[in-house]
Amino acid sequence: MPNTFAKQPEEQYPIEVDFSASGKLPSGTSVASGTVKAEDDAGADVSTTVLVSTTATVASNKAKVSVKGGTDSKGYKIIFTVTLSDGSKLQEEVYMRVKEE
């Protein structure tokens, strides 16, 4: 998944971050669990507005969550935080722009 993507307000679909591709995942560790948070351009928590869940589905060092809704012409920062098998934590951000076409 690119770090920035666009969606329409009525769309709902999964996005994922591959932590092994980020270069941050230490050798010998794996992603054990993950949470997701969403913020609007002003930094307010809008997780319940644009995320189906704040718990990420984890498989093969990837964290996945479904996005939904959003307001036309607004931007959102989707923040994935994962806990690794050794207890370490990593974070990646994805930017979502909502645009009615």
Image: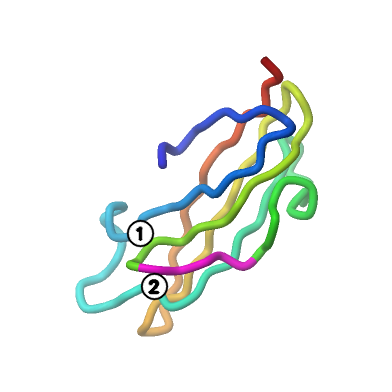
The label on residue 76 is none
Q: In the current view of this chain or complex, which residue is farthest to the top? A: 101
Within 10 angstroms of label 2, few (less than 14), some, or many (20 or more) residues?
A: many
Pick the residue in front: 23 or 12.
12
Tag 1 and tag 2, C-beta contact below 8 Å? yes
Q: Residue at x 52, y 31 (%)?
A: 5
List the residue tagged with mark 2. 31
Q: Position of residue 10 (x, y in %)?
A: 73, 33
Direction from residue 90 to residue 5 in the image, left or right: right
Give yes or no for residue 45 being in the magenta stretch: no
Direction from residue 16 to residue 41 in the image, left or right: right
Within 10 angstroms of label 1, few (less than 14), some, or many (20 or more) residues?
A: many
Q: Residue at x 60, y 48 (%)?
A: 78
Secondary structure beneath label 1: loop
Amino acid of disc 1:
Phe
Pick the residue in front: 86 or 70.
70
Q: In which quadrant of the rendered image does the C terminus lie?
A: top right
Separation of disc 1 and disc 2 at Cα? 8 Å
Q: In which quadrant of the rendered image does the N terminus lie?
A: top left
Residue 16's place in the image compared with 28, above or below, is above
Q: Position of residue 88 (x, y in %)?
A: 41, 77
Secondary structure beneath label 2: strand
Q: Position of residue 30 (x, y in %)?
A: 32, 75
Q: Residue at x 30, y 65 (%)?
A: 25
Residue 31's place in the image compared with 63, above or below, is below
The label on residue 19 is 1
- The magenta stretch is 55-59
